[in-house]
Image (cartoon, grey):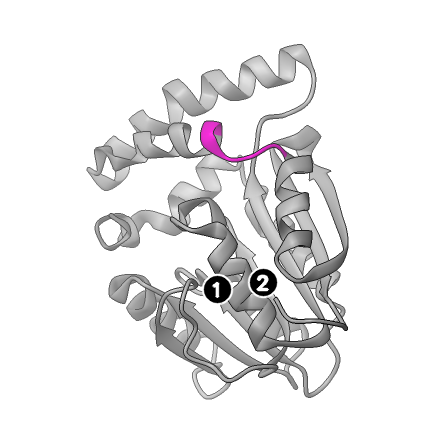
């Protein structure tokens, strides 16, 4: 599915988030508190937006972008070349549920708008915990339903009616109807925060953005025990 929508993915993200997705990614990067020399894993990197933003703001870090879609990775590589960051961003095809890295390889990990697409979220979170050093930081961005009666109703109508039509028009991919279903099926923030905690993390916090249209989850890799 993501190979098919890859060429229009960035434009559709702008439309779906009403232009807020870039600001949300910056919030996630801030939550990671990256320092020079830090090793960042960007899961579901897509076309590389978060990875490249992190490098632009922290040029002395090491970033690995992982995604299962070859076309997404090709677009990310092209964007990295245009940004002059091709030598700083390593791109790999892979699955968040079976990460090809040694334990404690990274200081920080991020996933923007990807965790709801993972079939086994608990397995993926445990894998992320495994490859993070103890005390390493995690930031996850995911879409949700805004708080409040009217805001929630408006968001549901937008996702149910407008987004699929834009997706079909711009990408010729009716799979964008999947977006509505995947958001509706994703756990409530309190439930997903508990899952993060149970998978090897501590100090779990969740912050609603844009009245809950998006949620930023942040956590630390537990310093004791294994995921």
Q: Is residue 146 above or below residue 65?
A: above
Which mark is drawn over residue 110? 2
Which residue is the site of mark 1?
43
Q: Are marks 1 and 2 in contact (CB under 8 Å)?
A: yes
In the picture, measured across the screen, residue 21 lies left or right of residue 180, that is right
* Residue 174 rendering spot, x and y as whole percentages: 22, 33
Q: Quadrant of the C terminus?
A: bottom right
* Residue 193 rendering spot, x and y as whole percentages: 67, 45
User: What is the distance, in whole Å, between disc 1 and disc 2 at their CAs?
Assistant: 6 Å
Q: Residue at x 58, y 62 (%)?
A: 110
For the view shown, which residue lies furthest in the front direction? Answer: 225
Q: Residue at x 40, y 28 (%)?
A: 180
Q: Residue at x 67, y 33 (%)?
A: 210
* Residue 67 rendering spot, x and y as whole percentages: 37, 65
Instruction: Please state the extent of the stretch shown in magenta in the rendering.
Output: 184-188
Taking depth in this image into account, of 50 and 198 the one nearest to the observer is 198
**Which callout, 1 or 2, points at the residue further toward the start of the chain?**
1
Q: State whether residue 50 appears in this view.
A: yes
Mark 1 burial class by Cα count in 10 Å: few <14, some 14-19, many 20+: many
Residue 187, magenta (yes or no): yes
Q: Is residue 192 above or below residue 164?
A: below
């Amino acid at each position: 599915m993501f190979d098919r929508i890859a060429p229009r993915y960035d434009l559709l993200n702008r439309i779906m988030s009403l232009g807020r997705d870039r600001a949300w990614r910056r919030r996630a990067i801030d939550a990671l508190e990256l320092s020079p020399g830090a090793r960042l894993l960007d899961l579901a990197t897509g076309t590389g937006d978060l990875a490249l933003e992190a490098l632009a703001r922290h040029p002395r870090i090491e970033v690995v972008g992982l995604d299962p879609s070859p076309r997404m990775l090709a677009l990310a590589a092209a964007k990295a070349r245009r940004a002059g960051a091709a030598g700083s961003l390593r791109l790999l095809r892979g699955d968040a549920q079976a990460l090809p890295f040694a334990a404690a390889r990274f200081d920080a990990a991020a996933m923007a708008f990807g965790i709801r697409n993972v079939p086994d979220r608990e397995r993926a979170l445990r894998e992320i915990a495994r490859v993070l050093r103890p005390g390493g930081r995690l930031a996850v961005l995911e879409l949700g339903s805004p708080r409040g009666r009217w805001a929630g109703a408006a968001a549901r109508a937008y996702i149910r009616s407008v987004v699929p039509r834009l997706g079909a028009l711009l990408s010729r991919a009716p799979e964008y109807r999947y977006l509505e279903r995947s958001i509706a099926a994703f756990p409530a923030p309190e439930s997903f925060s508990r899952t993060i905690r149970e998978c090897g993390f501590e100090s779990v916090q969740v912050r609603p953005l844009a009245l809950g249209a998006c949620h930023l989850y942040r956590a630390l890799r537990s310093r004791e025990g294994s995921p």
